[in-house]
Amino acid sequence: MLGLYRFLKYSAILLWSAFVAGPFLWALTTSFKTSEGIVSGATYIPWLQYKPSLDGWGVLFRRGGQGIDIVDPYLASLTVTLSASAISLVLGTLAAYGLSRFSYKAGPIKNADITFFFISQRIMPPIVLSIPFFLMLQAFGLLDTKLGLIIVYVALLMPIAVWVMIDFFHNIPVELDETAMLDGCRPVETFFRVILPNCKPGLVVAGLFCLIFGWNDFFFAFMLTFTKTQLLPVAVVALNSSVTPWWSLSASALVSVAPLVILAFVVEKYLSRGNLAGAIK
Amino acid sequence: MAKIDLNGVGHCYSGKPEKLEDFALRPMNHSWDHGRAYALLGPSGCGKTTLLNIISGLIRPSEGRVLFGGVDVTDQPTAKRNIAQVFQFPVIYKNVTVYNNLAFPLRCRKLPADEIDRKVREVARLLNLTEQLKSSAARLSADAKQLISLGRGLVRNDVAALLLDEPLTVIDPHLKWLLRRKLKEINDTYNQTMVLVTHDQNEALTFAEKVVVMQAGQIVQVGTAQELFENPRHTFVGYFIGSPAMNFMPCRLDGNAVKVGEERISLPELATVDVPPEGKVEIGIRPEFLKLEHDASPDTLEVPILNVRDLGNFRIATVRFAGHDLKIKIPEARPIPSEKGFLRFPRQWTKLYVDDVLREPAGA
């Protein structure tokens, strides 16, 4: 019985792993193929079925002519995503702490309404926001700049940070804040010295979400930039032409997804539930 | 270190109170003398924790003033009041060691490192935590964690009061007794004002010199265990303290007697009490003081005995009197009449309550 259970369990894990890893492996082999290795049917084994080539990768680092230079968009994407995520995380965490611990009231509007207001930013389809954002950035002369994109991304990412962190703060007993104040901390010290060290897993989750959404955004990066500033998703799409260059698209896809995969491995330990318990028990 | 005075302190959680019932804590005057051990006793939801949080500054009272040693601290933040509070569930800083947990309040006060070290080790010795000083606080058992919470209050020299909000709830029964004794020891050693919140009367009566009994947001009596037992000033104290609870019966005054239903109990002193016409009048007597005799005498009343329960070193007899079931606590050695007996209400222990409040005859 136990043997059958183990067999089914490992079969399911293997199947799922193949499902997840398959596209990556496919993209990896494709990135080393040339047009001959692709258009003449599916090929799997390098050197036997197709001749490996670095052409697909070379396109990414070629200036002018048939290639693109991926380094500048890569750095631009890193700058915009990291800055916007950091700002969103700081502001979002502070907002979430305030909403979780203090009562705000403006007429009929209370804490729950303010929280909903934050989260409702993500309910709207991006197209609805694009025109106001375009006009606002235009008015401030920030179209086609990294700063303009950072501001827009903060507006898009902060609701995620608030949403994740508010739930996290709700799970930290208020007695922990009260104890810190009894021990002699001012409210600001309570937050930084006692509460924040207790929310590392929450910060990691919120930060990860911000980075994923920021890094992968194509829509606003496409709408709000033209020539001076180009982010990675836009640069990757620009590779496409009348003949789809699968080899270089595969290479660029792998390059694009690499930072997030590495990040996921680094922060994996924070994502387990065990890290969340223990402050009061 | 100071006397704590509550002058007209009351609290309402939902905006402006319109009537007395709106208060979670009804406006009250009360003083906590320096260095004494108090117990705050009452059922859940009676306002005990609210009162504690007002003293520590976690709640600002909607009415009245809080004074520490005569100084108004009503608007002072918690951090400046020097109150130590231990909550029902142990609260620890889980990502640091036991040592750092104990040192935290002193570091907040920016004390020199050698003094912090000396105090932390002293308190760890007192609480038997020396062995665990280097362990991660999160890995300890619930009672060790609760000791850390307590220790954080004790490391400070200048604590005005140590407030304990049902701290023994999560502790194993056999450790409860040890911890309670430890608390007493700390009270003797440090001469700190201690307020222990509890709904367990045994805990309150064994720990405190004075017990403050609360009900429905108000203090109904403050006294020693003996005072609360012998002279409950409110029917609630009669119900809440003692087991079984005090016997109460509605009555009316008639000449020099108290009439319960159609039965007359001769109690000339009580009959002199001035009773308002609309008031709810009751007599009350503890099961320990009610007498069940074998033979009739002029001041006894015949009653049927409904049942007798043997509880080891004493028995509880239930009798029917004027339509009410009364409990009588009888020592094991004393014989109990069978089927019927003669009930006597000793004058000294029979109390009269008007609208739940004790009324004593003039000159009592």
Image (cartoon, coloured by chain):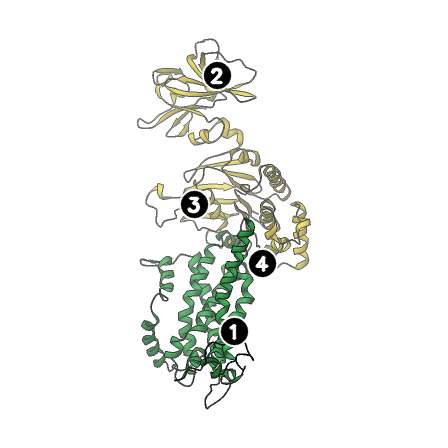
Chain colours: A green, B yellow
Q: Amino acid at mark 3?
A: Val
Give the class, few, some or many, for how many residues have Cα within 10 Å of label 1's Cα (few <14, many ≥20). Answer: few
Determine whether label 3 and label 1 are within 8 Å by CB: no
- Looking at marks 2 and 4 on the same chain, the residue that comes earlier in the sequence is marked by 4
> Which element is circle 3 on?
strand
Observer-nearest residue: A94 or A244?
A244
User: At 47% across and 83% down in the image, what residue appears?
Assistant: A35
Circle 1 sits on which residue?
A: A258
Label 1 is placed on what type of residue?
A: Ala
Sequence-wise, the earlier of marks 2 and 3 is: 3
Position above or below: A96 against B121: below
Choose mark 2 or mark 1, whichever is in front: 1
Chain letter for mark 2, please. B
Of all residues, the one furthest to the bottom in this rendering is A65
Q: Is residue B153 among the parts visible in the rendering?
A: yes
**Residues at marks 4 and 3, common chain?**
yes
Q: Residue at x 56, y 61 (%)?
A: A269
Report, in whole angstroms, how far the alpha carbon at label 3 lies from the one at label 1. Answer: 62 Å
Q: Which residue is mark 2?
A: B291
Kind of residue at disc 2: Lys
Q: What is the chain letter for disc 3? A: B
Q: CA distance from mark 2 to mark 1?
A: 88 Å
Q: Which residue is mark 3?
A: B9
Chain bearing mark 1: A
Q: Quadrant of residue A151?
A: bottom left
Whole-number angstrom distance, CA of label 2 to CA of label 4: 61 Å
